[in-house]
Image (tube, coloured by chain):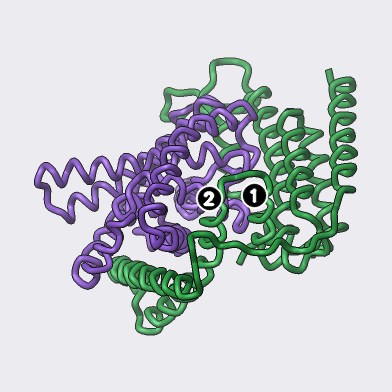
Chain colours: A green, B purple
């Protein structure tokens, strides 16, 4: 499902997840705090390149995931760039219903491009984490980062159950579709309602069965598992520092060259 | 003359196509993407969410201490919320979108549990599906796991007390909970980048049909559950 498949095939899979989390957060925060077009583009390029080179991901996969947030970005940047403006300063303008003047100003265009570059840089940083770290490693990292035990257990259990329920929902959906269950709006709503209630009831049954199974194996309220064997991955801290230095250098260069 | 007429027709068609395109992406576009909010706003929304999360977490911990079965059931409910949000919701204009499950979850599990489950589901959506993001998690949790569920739950409780028809109460709770989520998202975007009304118009146009579809869907789910799963619903009382 989603980035999960890539994460299990990644070359960085056996590396300790905690440095990967810090590496990603550092690149992400510097990219956001720098608030500059050049740093955004650099982060996008650098983190994508590291993702391909270190993680051994396929470029096609990465491009496919980078396309996902584009829908939001198009709407979000359009509303920044195109908005009601006063007289005069527009690069391009038109009258809406004869009364309001809408258009593009240089300032708004700049802001739109800035937000777009910054967001894509941040997204590529997030992909470095999610495409190279299986979710089970990440939950182990959450526990080592001192999040409450109950919360981490809920995350682990939900992750496992997602796959169970997706299977159930998919097979019911196929069965309904084979019987023309999604022809027309009324019937689609009805079929989907029935699917959801069936999945819900089954999930409750499954939950009860899982609990009985746990209890019969001596469950006392805590799901203890052994931590995985990881390569230490301390070099990622060095890499994080190097990336941050490059980001800052580019920021200074941009401030110098473009007044 | 004919030339200009066909040109107008072409322009109108392209506008209609663009509007349909917007409805198609609308369902996914609700999660604020990674990096879209400036850092102070991103952390500000996280801070706003913290008290709700703490309260929700404490209430869950109390329930789990009373009844250990609750932990597994809660996890199943969280997984259910994720699967629900991955389904394609049929919409009136033939475009497809995804249900939010805000109303259904709030009525079934209560708003306190929904805060924590919502956080986990949004985390998975960000990491596994790239919908939403890590720094925007606070803003997304606030609109989808706090405002929406509280509106739905409050409305449902109020309408039930007022003796309203149950199907109507479920419909209104789910549809208006959905809309409350979109309005919150537009406010969150509007306060940062200005132009709040424009965000609201885009969301209203694209999301109103989806909110109605989700309201209808929630009614169907409740009717079926009422008919065939009374005992299971009683099980939920432990949550």
Q: Position of residue A161 (x, y in %)?
A: 50, 67
Q: Secondary structure at mark 1?
A: helix
Left-right relation of A51 to A1:
right
- For the residues beneath circles 1 and 2, the answer to whether they share a chain is yes
Q: In terms of sequence position, does the residue under pointer 1 or pointer 2 come before the other? A: 1
Asked if the residue under mark 2 is in contact with the one under mark 1, i.e. CB atoms within 8 Å, the reply is yes
**Residue displayed at 39% across by 44% down:** B59
Q: Position of residue B112 (x, y in %)?
A: 37, 44
**Of residues A68 and A204, which is closer to you in this image?**
A204
Q: Which mark is residue A219?
A: none
**Residue displayed at 74% across by 42% down:** A121
Left-right relation of B152 to B121:
left
Bin the neighbour count of mark 2 within 10 Å (Cα to Cα): few under 14, some 14-19, many 20 and up.
Answer: some
Instruction: Give the residue number, with chain letter if any, for mark 1.
Output: A142
Q: Is residue A175 above or below residue A47?
A: below
Q: Mark 1 to mark 2: distance in Å? A: 9 Å
Q: Quadrant of residue A240?
A: top right
Image quarter in which the C terminus of chain B is found: bottom left
**Residue displayed at 56% across by 62% down:** A223
Q: Secondary structure at mark 2?
A: helix
Bin the neighbour count of mark 1 within 10 Å (Cα to Cα): few under 14, some 14-19, many 20 and up.
Answer: some
**Of residues A153 and B200, which is closer to you in this image?**
A153
Q: Position of residue A180 (x, y in %)?
A: 35, 80
- Write down the chain letter for disc 2: A
- Can residue A222 be seen in this snapshot? yes
Left-right relation of A45 to B54:
right
Q: Position of residue A125 (x, y in %)?
A: 74, 46
Left-right relation of A69 to B238:
right
Instruction: Give the residue number, with chain letter if any, for mark 2.
Output: A151
């Amino acid at each position: 499902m989603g980035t999960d498949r890539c994460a299990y095939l990644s070359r960085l899979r056996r590396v300790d997840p905690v440095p990967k989390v810090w590496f990603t957060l550092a690149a992400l925060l510097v990219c956001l705090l720098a608030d500059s077009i050049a740093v955004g583009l650099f982060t996008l390029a650098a983190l994508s390149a590291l993702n391909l080179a270190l993680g051994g991901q396929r470029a096609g996969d990465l491009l496919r995931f980078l396309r996902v947030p584009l829908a939001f970005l198009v709407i979000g940047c359009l509303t920044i760039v195109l908005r009601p403006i006063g007289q005069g300063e527009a690069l391009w303008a038109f009258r809406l219903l004869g009364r309001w003047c809408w258009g593009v100003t240089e300032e708004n265009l700049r802001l739109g491009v800035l937000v777009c570059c910054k967001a894509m840089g941040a997204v590529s940083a997030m992909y470095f984490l999610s495409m190279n770290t299986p979710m089970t490693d990440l939950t182990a990292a959450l526990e080592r980062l001192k999040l409450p035990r109950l919360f981490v257990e809920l995350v682990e259990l939900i992750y496992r159950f997602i796959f169970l329920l997706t299977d159930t929902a998919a097979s019911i959906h196929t069965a309904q579709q084979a019987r023309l269950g999604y022809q027309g709006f009324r019937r689609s709503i009805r079929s989907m309602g029935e699917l959801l209630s069936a999945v819900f009831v089954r999930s409750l049954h499954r939950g009860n069965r899982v609990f009985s199974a746990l209890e019969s194996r001596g469950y006392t309220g805590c799901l203890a598992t052994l931590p995985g064997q990881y390569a230490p991955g301390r070099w990622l801290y060095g890499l994080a520092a190097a990336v941050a230095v490059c980001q800052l250098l580019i920021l200074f260069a941009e401030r110098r060259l473009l007044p | 003359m004919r030339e200009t007429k066909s040109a107008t027709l072409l322009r109108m068609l392209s506008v209609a196509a663009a509007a349909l395109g917007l409805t198609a992406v609308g369902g996914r576009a609700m999660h604020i993407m990674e990096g879209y909010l400036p850092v102070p706003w991103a952390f500000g929304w996280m801070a706003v969410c913290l008290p709700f999360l703490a309260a929700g977490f404490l209430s869950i911990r109390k329930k789990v201490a009373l009844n250990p079965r609750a932990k597994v059931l809660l996890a199943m409910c969280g997984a259910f919320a994720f699967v629900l949000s991955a389904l394609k919701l049929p919409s009136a204009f033939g475009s497809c979108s995804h249900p939010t499950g805000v109303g259904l979850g709030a009525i079934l599990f209560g708003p306190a549990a929904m805060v924590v489950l919502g956080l986990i589901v949004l985390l998975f959506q960000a990491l596994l599906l790239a919908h939403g993001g890590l720094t925007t998690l606070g803003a997304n949790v606030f609109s989808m796991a706090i405002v929406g569920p509280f509106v739905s739950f409050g409305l449902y409780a109020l309408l039930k007390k007022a003796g309203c028809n149950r199907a109507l109460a479920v419909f209104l709770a789910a549809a208006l909970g959905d809309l409350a989520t979109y309005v919150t998202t537009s406010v969150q975007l509007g306060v940062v980048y200005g132009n709040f009304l424009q965000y609201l118009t885009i969301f209203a146009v694209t999301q109103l049909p989806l909110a109605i579809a989700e309201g209808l869907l929630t009614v169907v789910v409740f009717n079926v559950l009422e008919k065939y799963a009374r005992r299971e619903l009683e099980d939920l009382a432990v949550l």
